Image (cartoon, grey):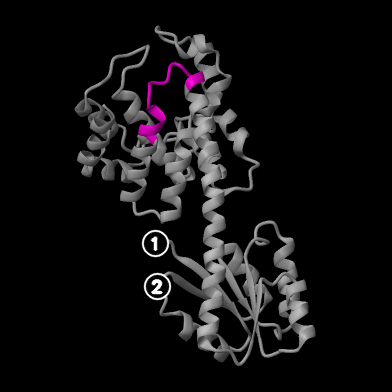
Amino acid sequence: MREFKILIVDDNLDNIRVITNILKTNPKYNLLYATNAQETFERTKEYRIDLILLDIIIFPIDGYNIARTLKKDPNTKEIPIIFVSAKSDNESILEGFLSGGADYISRPFNPFELEARVDNQIHIRAAQEEKIMSIERETIDIIATLGEEKSIGTSSKHIQRVAQYATLLARLSKLPQKQINEIGLAAPLHDIGKIVIDQKILNKQDKLSDEEFNKIKVHPTVGYEIFKDSPRDLFQAASIIAHEHHEAFDGSGYPKGIKGNAIHIYGRIVAIADVFDVLTTKRVYKEAWSLEKAKEYIELESGGKFDPDLVEIFINHFDDFEKIYKHYK
C-alpha cells in the first residue's frame, strides 16, 4: 500500500495537533507540518507531497499567497490544496478557490467531514497517478520493444529479464516502493540508445575493433538524451538508467567514468541485472555461460565493475535470481 504524505501548514501548533489527531489513525497517511511559507516550500522540495492542508492567516506570507506560489511552480502545481480556516465568509472561500484550492473547510469543522474530504482528494490523486502511470507503462513497452527489435544483437526477452532481475535486487536492497516501481518500469529502456548503432556492429560475431566499440559506447548518452528533458519521474528514471548502467564502481566504466556512490543506485542495480543476463544467454558473439560461472564473475567484480553491497545481496539471494532465469528459460 502506497503511503501518502500530507503537509499541514499552520502557524498555530494547536491547530496542527487537532488535525494530526484526527488523521493519524489512517495508516496510509504520513503527516508532516510547516508553520510558515519558507518551511512549506522546503517540505515540498524535500518530500513528494500528495496533499496540503493550508491555513489562511499565516505570517508573514498568508495562505493565499503560499498557494499561488505553489501553483506557479511546475514541481508543485499538481499538489491539491485544501484550505482549512476560521474564515467562513463567502469572499474568503472564493479567494481560496481562486488561489488554487481544491477544497475549503471552515473551522470549527466536523472531524468526519475533514476525514472524508481529505480521503476524497487522496483518492483523486491516486486515480490520476494510476492513469498517468498506465500511459507511461504503455509508452515504455512500445519504445522498449522497438528498441529490442532494432537491436537484433539483443537476445529475446532480454529487457523483460533485466527488469525482473533489477526489480528483485531493488526490493532486496530495501529501496522505497516508489523507486522499486520506477526501476522495474524503466529498466527495459536501458539499451534504447542502441537504436542509433549500425546493426552490422550489433550483430558482429567477431571481436569489435576499437572504432566499433567506441560507437557502441555512445548508446548510454543517446538514451539519456532521449528522456532527460521529460518532467515525468518515470522517464527521468529511464534517462538515469540508460546513462549510467555501463558505469563501473571503480570508475573504469563509461560514458562518464564516475565511480562509487556517484553512480545513481538505479545505474548500479541495472548494471548487475544487465551483465548477469548477458552472461547467461547466448549472443551472436558468444555462447551462454552457466549460472555458476556468471555468479562467480559477478562476485569477482565486486568493488570493480559492481557495487560490493549490491553484489553481496545478489550472492546471498542467488536462488531467487535463478528462479527468474528458469522461468524465462
Range covered by the magenta-colored residues: 149-162
Quadrant of res 325: top left
What's under tag 1, amino acid-wise? Met
Q: List x then y, in percent, for residue 39.
A: 62, 74
What's under tag 2, amino acid-wise? Pro
Residue on which the image places disc 1: 1
Question: Residue at position x 45%, y 34% from top?
Answer: 188
Question: Residue at position x 70%, y 84% from top?
Answer: 58
Q: List x then y, in percent, for residue 109.
A: 58, 89
How far, Cα to Cα, is label 1 from label 2? 9 Å
> Is residue 152 rendered magenta in the image?
yes
**Can I make out residue 249 in this image?**
no
Quadrant of res 287: top left
Q: Nearer the viewer, residue 292 or 136?
A: 136
> Taking 257 as reference, is 212 above or below it?
above
Question: Residue at position x 43%, y 16% from top?
Answer: 153
Residue on which the image places disc 2: 27
> Taking 117 as reference, is 262 above or below it?
above
Helix, strand or loop at label 2? It is loop
CB within 8 Å, label 1 to label 2: yes
> Is residue 276 rendered magenta in the image?
no
> Taking 34 as reference, is 214 above or below it?
above
Asked if residue 175 lies left or right of residue 300, the reply is: right
Quarter of the image with the N terminus in it: bottom left
Q: Nearer the viewer, residue 317 or 103?
A: 103
Residue extending farthest top: 206
Q: List x then y, in percent, for residue 279.
A: 31, 24
